[in-house]
Amino acid sequence: MQIIILLAIVLLLVLGPGLWVKRVMARYSKPADRYGHGGAETARRLLDALDLQRVTVEPSDTGDHYDPDARAVRLSAANYEARSLTAVTVAAHEVGHALQHASGFAPLQWRTRLVKWVAPVEKTGAVLMMATPVIIGLTRLPVAGLLMFMGGLLTLGSGVVIHLLTLPTEFDASFGRALPLLRQQGVLYEVDEPHARRLLRAAAMTYVAASLMSLLNVARWIAILRR
């Protein structure tokens, strides 16, 4: 019984933030026509006010994000077109990343570099993990277990590091950039500001949820190794 309770607590701690983020985003997605301007229009308005005309606003099939290489704010289809509080606030959060980029915000620069460095590391780790069973079958050497450990560490551990290092960047984009912008440009109805704060917190917390899921994957992988 105690093990079941412990597992339930762990699952709640790991899955809870992600479920909360989805709930908050969905709650303020309605009504979809609350504002006279959608996510894309909001992003464009804020970027122009910041004199960032070179940054484009594009629809995306891979979720809301800012691409520093392409200098593009990309919004999911729903947030690109919708005029909900969620769409407007998420657009402002991504513009916050564009402003970080333009101002040379160090944590964003380091995260961008780290993602590029980690990509080949993750690929190497994945190859090691896939090759380990073959190596074990051919050689029957203990070193195969070490290869599997290294592969898992490179593949799963690097994702955890990136997500954790992303958190300061996300919170700054939400509360150091987006919220002041929304106030200065008079984008929100005054009554919506507390709700926008909750949405901005949720936008940043997506990476907390991702970090916890990555840690859960690491724990599962270690459990498999110990069998």
Image (cartoon, rainbow, N blue to C red):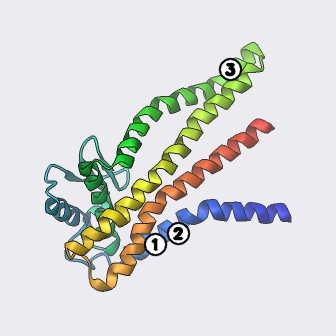
Question: Residue 5: x and y, percent?
Answer: 79, 66
Local packing at callout 1 (Cα closer than 10 Å; few below 14, some 14-19, many 20+) is some
Question: Residue 88: x and y, percent?
Answer: 28, 69
Q: Are marks 1 and 2 in contact (CB under 8 Å)?
A: yes
Instruction: In the displayed orientation, state which residue is furthest to the bottom.
Output: 191
Picture layout, residue 79 above or below residue 103? below
Where is mark 1, residue-wise?
24
Picture layout, residue 197 above or below residue 146? below
Where is mark 3, residue-wise?
134
Mark yes or no: residue 76 visible: no
Give me the C-alpha separation between circle 2 and circle 3: 42 Å
| Viewer-side residue, 191 vs 102 | 102
Element type at mark 1: helix
Where is mark 2, residue-wise?
20
Local packing at callout 2 (Cα closer than 10 Å; few below 14, some 14-19, many 20+) is some
Q: Amino acid at mark 2?
A: Trp
Element type at mark 2: helix
| Viewer-side residue, 72 vs 197 | 197
Give me the C-alpha separation between circle 3 and circle 1: 46 Å
Question: Residue 170: x and y, percent?
Answer: 41, 57
Q: Amino acid at mark 3?
A: Val
